[in-house]
Image: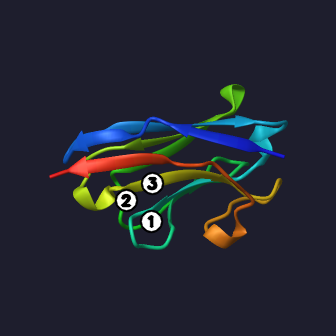
């Protein structure tokens, strides 16, 4: 069982930056594929970024490539999302998620196994 708690959201002006964190509890954090997803008002939850549990390869949605960076610190049981050059369309609740243990990477909402409650990012124009 993995429990996830996001933090770091807030109100920021367009062009600004934030660093989102996701603290994980439970054993063997390093063996879980992790990801960030987001859900804007009135829209479905969508993939943002993912990181493999082995090798650390990263994956991004086209809409955030070059602006967002996902990383993990296994010693601290923490997942991060550095979000730069924010746009109003990035406004959403951002969710941290973990996939099944030992699955190399997970890129889809339906395949993620554990979810945090989310942190709200609001970007003003």
Q: Residue 96: image x %, image y %?
A: 59, 50
In the visual, does 45 lie left or right of 85?
Answer: right
Circle 3 residue: 93
Q: Gap between marks 1 and 2, in whole Å?
A: 6 Å
Circle 1 residue: 61
Which mark's residue is nearer the viewer, 3 or 1? 3
Q: Gap between marks 3 and 1, in whole Å?
A: 16 Å
- SS at mark 3 in the image: strand
Pointers 1 and 2 in contact (C-beta within 8 Å)? yes
Q: Residue 123: image x %, image y %?
A: 26, 49
Q: Which mark is residue 14?
A: none
Do we see residue 79 in this rendering?
Answer: yes
Q: Which mark is residue 64?
A: 2
Q: State the count of labels.
A: 3
In the visual, does 30 lie left or right of 121?
Answer: right
Mark before the other along the chain sequence, 2 or 3: 2
Q: Residue at x 55, y 41 (%)?
A: 71
């Amino acid at each position: 069982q993995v429990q996830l708690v996001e933090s770091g959201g807030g109100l920021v002006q367009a062009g600004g930056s934030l660093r989102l964190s996701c603290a994980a509890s439970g054993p063997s954090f390093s063996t879980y594929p992790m990801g960030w997803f987001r859900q804007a008002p009135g829209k479905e939850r969508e993939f943002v970024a993912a990181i493999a549990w082995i090798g650390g390869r990263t994956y991004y949605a086209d809409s955030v490539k070059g602006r967002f960076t996902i990383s993990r610190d296994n010693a601290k049981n923490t997942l991060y999302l550095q979000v730069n050059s924010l746009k109003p369309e990035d406004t959403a609740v951002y969710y941290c998620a973990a996939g099944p243990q030992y699955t190399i990477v997970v890129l889809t909402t339906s395949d993620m196994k554990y979810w945090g409650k989310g942190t709200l990012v609001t970007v003003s124009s």
